[in-house]
Image (tube, rainbow, N blue to C red):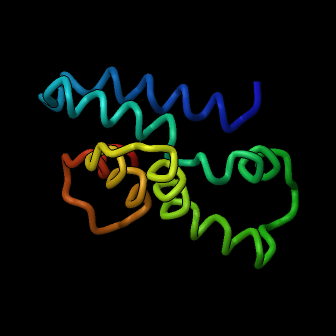
Amino acid sequence: MAYSASHAIICASLCHLVAPELKLSPEQANSLSLAALTMNVSMTRLQDDLAEQLNPLSDEQRLDVKAHADRSAQYLRELGVSDTAWLHAVAHHHDEDTQVGSLTHVLM
């Protein structure tokens, strides 16, 4: 299995396991799991390549990694996703100033 796919499944599984401990509603838990599955959708091929790459990231790769959260959220919107919690968690899953306990914070 490709790294990006296995990473998404592991993240979604962990989110599913911690959701009850965080006292998330079923809707929040669903949004969180879906965000975990899709947060890197815009860089799956790059993520797979980077998992095998021995050299440091190139400048282009660094820019792609930096832009992937917003790009992933945009792809999801284009595909018809309208769940604002899901989209917000994807778009901000690398933000360092997220509120502890928020869906986005769990994805960090």
Residue 51 lies, with reference to residue 21, above or below; the image says: below
Residue 37 position in % (x across, y down) = 50, 34
How many numbered tags mark residues here?
A: 0
- Residues 97 and 78: in front is 78
Residue 24 position in % (x across, y down) = 16, 30
Residue 96 position in % (x across, y down) = 35, 66
Q: Quadrant of residue 20?
A: top left
Q: Could you tell me which residue is drawn at 75 percent across and 68 percent down?
A: 61
Residue 58 lies, with reference to residue 18, above or below; the image says: below
Q: Left of 92 or right of it: where is 71?
A: right
Q: Could you tell me which residue is drawn at 44 percent across and 52 percent down?
A: 77
Q: Left of 20 or right of it: where is 106?
A: right
Q: Could you tell me which residue is drawn at 30 percent across and 51 percent down?
A: 105
Residue 1 lies, with reference to residue 50, above or below; the image says: above
Q: Quadrant of residue 30?
A: top left
Q: Left of 51 or right of it: where is 76?
A: left
Residue 82 position in % (x across, y down) = 33, 45
Residue 103 lies, with reference to residue 73, above or below; the image says: above
